[in-house]
Amino acid sequence: MFRHVVLLSIDPTAGPGAVERIVAALRDLPARIPEVRGYVVGPDAGLADDNASVAIVADFDDESGYLAYRDHPAHQDVIAEFIRPVLVGRAAVQHHVE
Amino acid sequence: MFRHVVLLSIDPTAGPGAVERIVAALRDLPARIPEVRGYVVGPDAGLADDNASVAIVADFDDESGYLAYRDHPAHQDVIAEFIRPVLVGRAAVQHHVE
């Protein structure tokens, strides 16, 4: 299995609706991108002041499945419409899972 | 379920052994912290130049399980001995999973 983990930091002045819209838009993606095997998205629970805003853990059979997701037009549309306009930080890792 | 997702960025001048030691030390934690329900740690595969170095996805029954992990001496020892000396960036989110 190949895992993609990403944390998004959303501009706090964008309002709580911005995070809700991103989470909802991302959760639509597994139905539209057949390479996705597992997909868990969640908004931060607020336990730590310096946390990011949204976590995404996406699983694929292999690296090529991840690349298909990364470059899929439905994913790119979510990034362009919902994420990029309010994004202030992003961290990511892709790794193999035994 | 309650999920903790963290991405660590390790000083590249610390050498590849630093990431390997962190991954190995973290993978020992589930055997020592009974509240851990799921725990997947991986070093970045190197697909993107601006990625972080290590991903940790840890699952617990609830928020109190996460707090027990966060504050557990075995976890704090790994942070103090292996992570903090070489850490240059960190992003985290905790979220509920339905």
Image (cartoon, coloured by chain):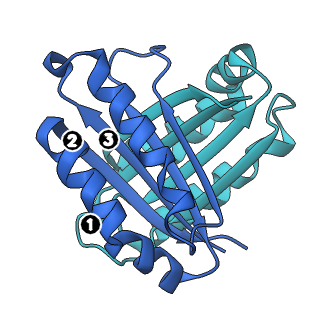
Chain colours: A blue, B cyan
Q: Residue under circle 2? A: A89
Tally the marks.
3
Callout 2, which amino acid?
Answer: Gly
Label 1's element? Answer: helix
Judge whether A71 appears above or below A77 on screen: below
Find the distance from the CA under tag 3 to the CA under tag 2. Answer: 6 Å
Label 2's element? Answer: strand
Tell me what residue is drawn at x 39 percent, y 43 percent.
Answer: A25
Q: Are marks 1 and 2 on the same chain?
A: no
Find the distance from the CA under tag 3 to the CA under tag 1. Answer: 26 Å
Find the distance from the CA under tag 1 to the CA under tag 2. Answer: 23 Å
Query: Is A97 or A16 nearer to us in this picture?
Result: A16
Callout 3, which amino acid?
Answer: Leu
Tell me what residue is drawn at x 50 percent, y 45 percent.
Answer: A27
Q: Are marks 3 and 2 on the same chain?
A: yes
Tell me what residue is drawn at x 46 percent, y 40 percent.
Answer: A55
Residue A8, label in figure: 3
Q: Position of residue A14 (x, y in %)?
A: 17, 21
Q: Residues within 10 Å of mark 2 (few under 14, many from 20)?
A: some
From the image, which quarter does the C terminus of chain B lie in? top right
- Can residue B21 be seen at all in this image of the molecule? no
Q: Residue under circle 1? A: B13
Residue A89: quarter of image = top left
Callout 1, which amino acid?
Answer: Thr
Q: Position of residue B53 (x, y in %)?
A: 40, 61
Judge whether A86 appears above or below A95 on screen: above
Query: Is A13 or A7 nearer to us in this picture?
Result: A13
